[in-house]
Image (cartoon, rainbow, N blue to C red):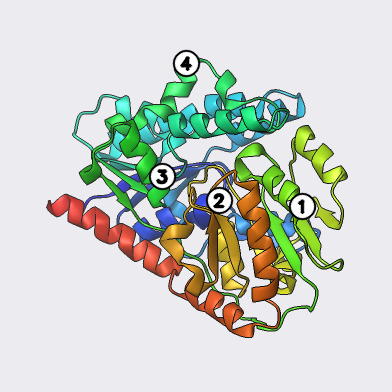
Amino acid sequence: MKKYVCAFRGRRDSYQVPLALAEGGMLDQFITDAYASSSIRILARFLPERFREKVTSRWIDGIPIERVRRLWFSMLAEHVRHRLGCPRARTFAQFDKRFSKAAAQRATRSCSDLFLYSPYAWEAFTASYPHSPRRILFQYHPHYDTEQRILNQDAQRFPGVGESFSTGPLGELPEELLRRERDVWRHADLTICASSFTRYSLIKAGCSETQCRVIPYGVELPNRFAARRPKEFRVLFVGSGVQRKGLHHLLYAWRQARLPASSKLVIVCRLMDRGIESIVADTPRIELYQHVSRTRLNELYEQSSLFVMPSLCEGFGQVYLEALAHGCPVLGTRNTGLPDVGDENDGVFCVEPADVAALTSKLETLVQVLQNNTEVFIKARACAARHSWGLFRSALRDSLQFDESG
């Protein structure tokens, strides 16, 4: 059986890809930055809740700790650069190389194959090996060309609201760093995407349809579920306050929509561009949270009438499934993973991206549709139940095995 090296920073996709490989006996090594061993998790019990959550989230049952390699120094160096005010996009792009090179070194030593996320694949996919490794790419963002075209068009319509990625637009990266993610699909034997939209963007760039497959993400259903919602219309947004997430479109639509005076727009946003901050400041009936615990976030999902994230360009949008799992209907755009998840019969509503008028009209319609409608909340949770993480992992393994046999 083939074994794979997997590499990425953070807790990308809740570690479901390396877990899927481990469950199938296909994980050679998982390379990441911070991952909590049992001793670290024990010590975390004595930390404040916010830090305890961060530590315990960097672990998942099912991945043997002896299969994990942690690049602690890389993580520390990144945090130092962030503190010094270095552009995050440039820092990430430069340090991503370390994960890719580590994957190449491991694959060389163990004669393993490669299953790498797009930012961490270039050096490993283009390296020379004493064997012929399979190169499996997980493309979790839409292709760069499609993303930039959409963002540039939106920037012309809404000047002053630009994609910054905290301190510097992705477009400011030098060509050598840009091509790492823009062109890496050319070196993959198989590319897996979480959404049909991401697949479309790759095919538009020239990727073969037969070598690009869609496996939508999954979610874990919470034990608690409340079909009844507060009488007032409460809309929830969870995500980064950047152009790509379409928060400015939601804010403009919220201003224009004819909604009950008691309506509230709740925004959970750790990072926000200054241009969008100014729109938030001038928008009525908003509750803004910068940091919330997982427990509090779950409560917000349960207390909301509707989750809205009108993204311009999204690889999938895991928060949609999180909201649905709590029985909260969702409203987004077709440039996301929502068309792969369900339709209006499932509590999944879509508008065209960047269409503020359509978004405004949909809000006005849904405030009537959702009022005292417990059935739609039940259907939303049922929709999420059809997209479990277990099914995602199984589909991923099946795809690899089919590819090997083919």
The label shown at residue 175 is: 4
Looking at numbered disc 4 in the image, what kind of residue is underneath it?
Answer: Glu
Visible residue check, residue 123: yes
Q: Quadrant of residue 184?
A: top left
Identify the mark nearer the N-term, 2 or 1.
2
Q: Secondary structure at mark 2?
A: loop
Q: Position of residue 310 (x, y in %)?
A: 61, 51
Q: Residue at x 52, y 61 (%)?
A: 60
Contact (Cβ within 8 Å) of mark 2 with mark 1: no
Q: Position of residue 70 (x, y in %)?
A: 52, 42
Q: Secondary structure at mark 1?
A: helix
Identify the mark nearer the N-term, 3 or 4.
4
How many angstroms separate mark 3 from mark 4 (CA)? 22 Å
Q: Position of residue 392 (x, y in %)?
A: 39, 63
Q: Which is in the foreground here, disc 2 or disc 3?
A: 3
Q: Residue at x 76, y 29 (%)?
A: 83
How many angstroms separate mark 4 from mark 1 (CA)? 41 Å
Looking at numbered disc 2 in the image, what kind of residue is underneath it?
Answer: Arg
Q: Residues within 10 Å of mark 1 (few under 14, many from 20)?
A: some
Q: Position of residue 393 (x, y in %)?
A: 37, 62
Q: Secondary structure at mark 3?
A: helix
Q: Secondary structure at mark 4?
A: helix
Q: Which residue is under mark 2?
A: 11
Q: Which residue is under mark 3?
A: 198
